[in-house]
Image (spheres, rainbow, N blue to C red):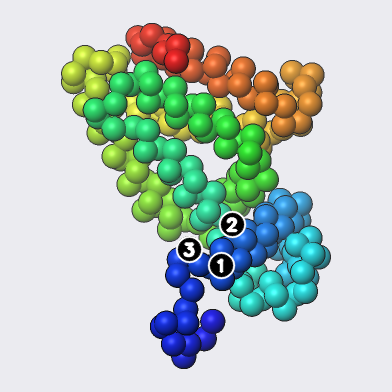
Amino acid sequence: MSPETQIENRPTKRGPRHVARQAMEERILDAAAWVFSQSGYDGATMAEIAIKADLPKANVHYYFKSKAGLYSTVLSKILATWLDQMNAFTADQDPAMALKRYIHGKIELSRVYPIPSRVFANELLHGAPFIDRELATDLRDEVDRIAEVFKTWKERGRIRPVDARHLLITLWAATQTYADFEVQVDTVLRAKAGEKAVFQAGAEQLTEIVLRGLGLEVPRE
């Protein structure tokens, strides 16, 4: 919609035009994530993304002006989703419950969004040229915040001493591997790709290991 459009004619945030635009952007982002996961950034093309989205190339360019912008949006979206999961950690939360919810939520994201996770992993393997700023600001700031939460829990005698940063890195590796190395996981477990029971079992076992190591009982909610 052009800037000249009168305010009264603009759709509200929840209006039908906004919903339609959001749905179209999601469609393009899903297609882009798949193409980037298969071809990498350098190998992917806007034409290939348009074919995957079943849209004219001009439509893709209408919503995303460049491949770089589209790729950055795919990365930022998955990072934002992961950061939202970190809201489970606050000083007033029960440590065992917060960790359980985070682990289960993170593994569920690997089940639901495996392709964006692989795109993100590939970006990191190439030095994070498109997402380095967000890593150095949004991610690091959130990790610093969580480290303070763990420090408070320790001072209150609620958990055993632990380096929260190393713990988070361990949890990311343990949860994202279900998406990033799906073939290996399925081969070892003789499972079918995306099988929910596999992710659930992994979440329960990881929760048990982490909580026991911190001297916590596993919540049975």
N-terminal-most mark, 2 or 3: 3
Disc 1: which residue: 16
Q: Which corner quadrant of the image does residue 199 belong to?
A: top right
Q: Position of residue 34 (x, y in %)?
A: 72, 52
Query: Which element type, helix, strand or loop, lies under badge 3?
Result: loop
Most foreground residue, 162 or 33: 33
Identity, as a three-letter code, of the amino acid under mark 2: Val
Mark 2 or mark 1, whichever is nearer to me: 1
Q: Which residue is mark 2?
A: 74
Residue 171 visible at all: no
Q: In this rendered view, identify the residue nearer to me: 26 or 102.
A: 26
Locate residue 176, reporting x and y percent. 58, 34
Q: Amino acid at mark 3?
A: Arg
Secondary element type, mark 2: helix
- The front one of 194 and 70 is 194
Residue 73 percent location from the top left of the image: 55, 61
Query: Where does the N terminus fall, quadrant-wise?
Result: bottom right
Looking at the picture, tell me which residue is in the foreground, 17 or 51. Answer: 17
Q: What is the CA distance from the residue labelled 2 to the residue labelled 1?
A: 24 Å
In the image, is 216 to the left or to the right of 76?
left
Gap in angstroms between the C-alphas marked 2 and 3: 23 Å
Observer-side mark, 2 or 3, equals 3
Q: Residue at x 49, y 27 (%)?
A: 103
Residue located 59% across and 48% down the image:
120
Q: Residues within 10 Å of mark 3 (few under 14, many from 20)?
A: few
The answer to whether marks 2 and 1 mark residues whose Cβ atoms lie closer than 8 Å is no
Q: Residue at x 34, y 26 (%)?
A: 163
